[in-house]
Image (cartoon, coloured by chain):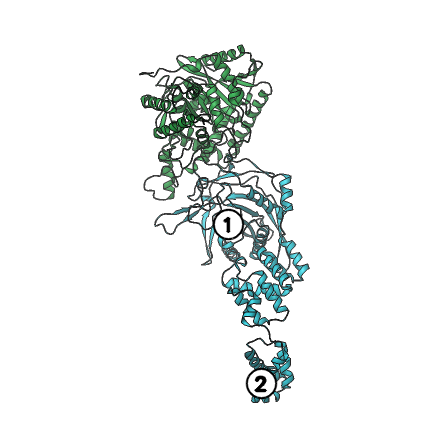
Amino acid sequence: MHTKTLTELKAGLAAGEFSSRELTEHFLGRIQQFDADINSFVTVTEQQALAQADAADAALAGGKGGLLTGLPIAHKDIFCTEGVRTSCGSKMLDTFIAPYTATVVEKMAAEGAVMLGKTNMDEFAMGSSNETSYYGPVKNPWDRERVPGGSSGGAAACLGARLAPAATGTDTGGSIRQPAALNGITGLKPTYGRVSRWGMIAFASSLDQAGPMGLSAADCALMLQAMAGHDHRDSTSLNEKVDDYLGALNDDIRGLTIGVPEEFFPDTLDGAIADNSREAIRELEKLGAKVVSVSLPSIKLSVPAYYVIAPAEASSNLSRFDGVRFGHRCDDPQDLEDLYKRSRSEGFGDEVKRRILVGTYALSAGYYDAYYRRAQQVRRLIRDDFARAFEKVDVLMGPTAPETAFKLGDKKDDPVSMYMADVFTIGVNLAGLPALSMPTGFIKGLPTGTQVIGNYFREGQILNVAHKYQQATDWHKQAPVLGGAK
Amino acid sequence: MSWEVVIGLEIHVQLNTTSKLFSGSKLSTGAEPNTQASLVDLGMPGTLPVVNREAVRKAALFGLAINADICRHSVFERKNYFYPDLPKGYQTTQLDKPVVGAGEVEIQLESGEKKIVRIHHAHLEEDAGKSLHEDFHGMTGIDLNRAGTPLIEVVTEPDMRNAEEAVAFARKLHAIVTSIGICDGDMSQGNMRFDVNVSIRRPGDALGTRTETKNLNSFRFMERAIKLEVERQIDVLEDGGEIVQETRLYNGDTHTARSMRSKEDANDYRYFPCPDLLPVEITEADLDALKASMPELPDTRKARFLADYQLSEYDADLLSGDLATAAFFEVAAKAGGDAKLAANWVMGELAAKLNAEEKTINDSPVSADQLGQLIARLKDGTISSKIAKQVFEACWAGEGDPDAVIEAKGLKQMSDSGELEKIVDDIIANNAPQVEDYRSSDDAKKKKKIGFFVGQAMKATQGKANPQQLNALLKEKLG
């Protein structure tokens, strides 16, 4: 069952080939068998999953299924889930049982999804390798000595390892797309404001966006159909109608124009990575798409601008973790300052502290104009670059990440090199655009991915392009050999 | 050489919206701690703010009331600092683009002179919770019921030159916000809190270093705190010292103030636009609707009171200032048919009684209609002013409307001359020595001595005799 896509499992459930309980038990079994090694889950909610599966079976029997009824899904541990620990990969929230449920989780549950558990992630979604998690690094299922990417590394790895057929992720600077590329799966970051942020623990509020991760573009379309929509509890969620993503999957792509930004293929880029994405673009050309070269001159400023804006927002967003109302509190505080200092020093890991310090500095008196204001100006330039490109093209394509999965520990002590892992993904967040990463081949046995970027609210078109590509290729069907029973 | 005092105010005005500024929870009304604090108010991870449009409308209405520019796209910012009763670690407030821009308020001084106080701006922000230091030995309790309550902070230019001007401004602001219905104006509940910036200088010099005295919650404390601070600054400078820029706390009970923190300890608040909120849009149509709904402002009301009721400038000023008082007065004046009498009763007997029992006019046991009825009976001669006070007391005690009280207690003035004449005749017959004494006195003495007979008659009628009628009768009979 685990080799099937979510779309196929949905059909199997509908046809009565298996029950949701059987399906759920199968994946719970795989988690038990393989996850001690992969470490993709922080919490497995077995009892709850089985109860939801039984309810789903009853609903299906009564012909009352929703979009996702009976389908097992893993949620990134950044989404609040009532009654279930929501750790955000941090010691700070190791004992935090959320008192309410995030909109994304709620909407998927309303469509009948079965929650398998909560996936591992970089602490507070800060990282590109999943090595900053308090719960230890996630291992890449294609090579257990390598990272799965981050911050949605647990989600991508559990999909790669077929421990779950679908997962949610969040993407602030590439946290869905980069791990998707490194694990050979498909992941979509929607337009900023397409999916509600209510109940999703904030890293950088103006960049954070939740999205689907799955084995195919069609699976992502199915999930996004359930996730997307306006939420009155999130002022930045946009009141824009939700398109029929599933219906658009098979649209004709003949005549579609693909823009290839020259900045996504710099001379310094690994030739194999460049060739791989060019090959994927050629495949779509064969399917009738037109390809033109475009330029995004300001995109080179995206990493520095991002590493001012995101830490600045994070430094403020993470102030609420002060040991007063929830989360880690130091033992025996001597006074208020001691309570703050020790609770935060003990509760946060190094990368989180680094970003709080950087962000605090960037916002401080006398530096605001030089850093934060300037970074916002750069952000506008980047947005304008994309807007100009979209006057001429329908989608933009290029590599998702500059390299395949790197070895655990390789970049842990070199933050700048780590930050460059998101060089192709960050501009999209700064502009608020939707983008997808899909598997487009292997380099030395490791998966690599190509990014499809669309205009605002054109998720349907991106998914359509990726689906057409996946109809013509089978990279997305490749799964790693985990050892033991496959 | 004399010193010139320079005063600027920052006033926190609590808006009387149904719900909080960003969370939708009800405003706290003395509920058990932390029972009116939602997930958003608690700063729970993953929660997000949504702006309360009612609060924005009320802030904009205030802007229109002071002839200020209204910002069409005002922006909320985060003011970052750690404090246990600040759940998110930042206060959501406004800095560069507040809802209300520059405006002005006219005040009238006791001398009758008028003066303009310029408003620099007014911004919307959320209140913090409360830290409770009693009841928890060696610890602090946190109550977040107040967290997220909408405030507007009104910031003046340093236009006031003494405590009296500052108080006149504060009273005027109170009159405006209560008249337009955006604030309940109950100072004892912290509905309005004043921060006072004071500096002194030699006339013509540049502004001196200022201090800020925070959280004054009555006009009287404000006045006393300003005077105290001015004296302190004069002492320091005349002793050759320097004023340190600092925040000070005033204790109204002991009439002392102390330094709370100096500028060096001040936080770097790291303001930046709140990424969870979009700019707040106010359209031309919104403004038109607000203008159309603008209630009567205190200045307009005062002018109307002067014209319609022929009140004195002083009476008109006092009665028009507070919306509840003004409304009470108008009902009583109309029901009673005598504005001057109504004004006297509202500012006299009623105010004294409310004061003594620490009640606001909204809680007055005597309604405006009842007071009006009382005035009507006074005016038509049914009761004397002395009896009127007795009737008022009975109404206050809940014994019913004035007419019912007068009826039940038989307080109707005795105006039947036949009955009164008989009583007077009896008194004269029964008090021969006093009558003799009276008749042998000169006019000046007679004026005094008639009091005895009036007293006897009042006693005999239980105070119901019409005083004018009685006097005339006595004079006639005694000769």
Q: Chain of mark 1?
A: B
Q: Chain of mark 2?
A: B
Instruction: Count residues near mark 2 (Cα–Cα under 10 Å), then give few for <14, some for 14-19, many for 20+.
Output: few
Three-letter code, disc 1: Glu
Compared across the picture, whether A41 is left or right of B64 comes to: left
Mark 2: secondary structure: helix
Q: CA distance from mark 2 to mark 1?
A: 74 Å
Q: Which mark is residue B426?
A: 2
Residue at (49, 14) in percent of width and height: A469
Q: Which quadrant holds residue A6?
A: top left
Rendered shade, chain A: green
Q: Which quadrant holds residue B414?
A: bottom right
Q: Residue furthest right?
A: B307
Residue A93 in percent (x, y) is at 37, 34
Q: Nearer the viewer, mark 2 or mark 1?
A: 2
Quarter occupied by the N terminus of chain B:
bottom right
Q: Which mark is residue B212?
A: 1
